[in-house]
Amino acid sequence: MVKVLSVGELLIDFTPYGLSDKGDPLFEQNAGGAPANVAAMFARLGGDVSMAAKVGDDAFGESLVRTLREAGVDTAPIRRTNEANTTLAFVHLDEGGDRSFSFYRKPGADALLREEEIPDALIAGAGLIHAGSVSMTKEPVCSATLSVIRRAAAMGKPVSFDPNIRESLIEDREKLLRDIRDILPSVTYLKVAEEELEWIAGEPDEETACTFLRKEYGIPVIVSTKGARGSACYSEDGCAEAPGFEVTPVDTTGAGDAFWGAFLHKVIGSGAGGKTPEPGQLERWLRFANAAGALATTKRGGIPALPDKRAIEMLMS
Ligand code: ADP
């Protein structure tokens, strides 16, 4: 079975779920971080996946490693450090379940992952590399992420990339944009939320932006996610689209990651690897991924809210 290596953010999300008798917010704590959620979703669907990240030498770090291991992810490449605490993120939810984040103690341990802590052998042992997210806005993890992507591409490995841009966390827009554009030529599967497209391509129209990115950077497959409206995919066969499923969202945290873990499951399962999928296949993959994303919004939290194959197939039927 083809192994996936997911690299970067690994943290504890604190999600509010109500108020105490005194009116203080009550939080639920969950393992999260976009690449960790993607890894957990991929593993939940039976995939073979390792996570490369860094946690603090503390109880939160231990709990993160345990949660990922229990989700079926190989945690051997996760490093521990006493230079920083495990990263903690506080999620704020609005009434529709949409969320924003704030971080406690920056930079947390996951930002301290270094290039040399992801050896060539680890990359060589994987059939596909997934990276991106907030890891692109902090050092040294940003340099480590860029290095993994470059080394993977040099080895001929397909690379999956999700920029996962969170406006409030960007300190240096120019640098982030430069870094993203630098590695786009190494990317095989690009996932972008529709609001990120204008940011990266400088063009708000989805089709124009994706066509431009495919041509300019030679990216074989670009998937654009559109919340409740579903998703679209641009490849050499043109555009495939699949509408979203109707659900009642309570917390959209991790919807994009559930979507992408499910999409990568199809990429790997089909044996497509770095190749462009066959016509017609993409709609089915998008539909499967849309169902995973929709189900992830119906429960609070990241990893605990990830659906299994049965639930996905039930929603699709
Ligand atoms: P991201 O979390 O990366 O910003 P989206 O919010 O677009 O991405 O969500 C990813 C996918 O999850 C969507 O393409 C869709 O398939 C599904 N999804 C997200 N929100 C909803 C929703 N409210 N109703 C149904 N499906 C949703």
Image (cartoon, rainbow, N blue to C red):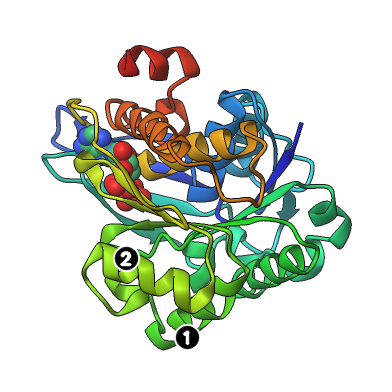
Residue type of the residue flagged with mark 2 = Glu
Q: In the rendered image of this protein, does residue 155 appear above or below residue 177? A: above
Residue 29 x %, y %: 42, 35
Residue 253 seen anywhere in this rendered image of the structure = no
Q: As displayed, is residue 317 above or below residue 183?
A: above
The reply, left or right, for residue 246 in relation to residue 127 is: left
Q: Which residue is mark 2?
A: 196
Foreground: 157 or 100? 157
Question: Would you say the residues marked 1 and 2 are in contact, meaning their CB atoms lie under 8 Å apart?
Answer: no
Crowdedness near tag 2: few (<14), some (14–19) or many (≥20) residues, C-alpha within 10 Å: many
Q: SS at mark 2?
A: helix
Query: Image quadrant of residue 211?
Result: bottom left
Task: Give the camera-side residue of 281 and 242.
Answer: 281
Residue 277 placement, left or right of 275? left
Residue at horizontal 77%, vertical 69%?
154
> Considering only vertical position in the picture, is 221 above or below 300?
below
What is the quadrant of residue 50 in the picture? top right
Residue 276: % across, % down: 57, 50
Quadrant in which ligand 1 is drawn: top left
Task: Look at the image and tell me in which quarter the C terminus lies.
Answer: top left
**Residue in the image at 29% along x and 32% along y:** 297
Question: Farthest residue toward the bottom?
Answer: 174
Compute the Cα span from label 1 to label 2.
16 Å
Q: Which residue is painted at 14% across and 33% down in the image?
A: 22
Q: Is residue 20 left or right of residue 5?
A: left
Question: Residue type at mark 1?
Answer: Lys
Give the residue at mark 1. 175
Q: Is residue 175 above or below residue 112?
A: below
Q: Position of residue 249 (x, y in %)?
A: 21, 31
* Figure quadrant of residue 296: top left
SS label for mark 1? helix
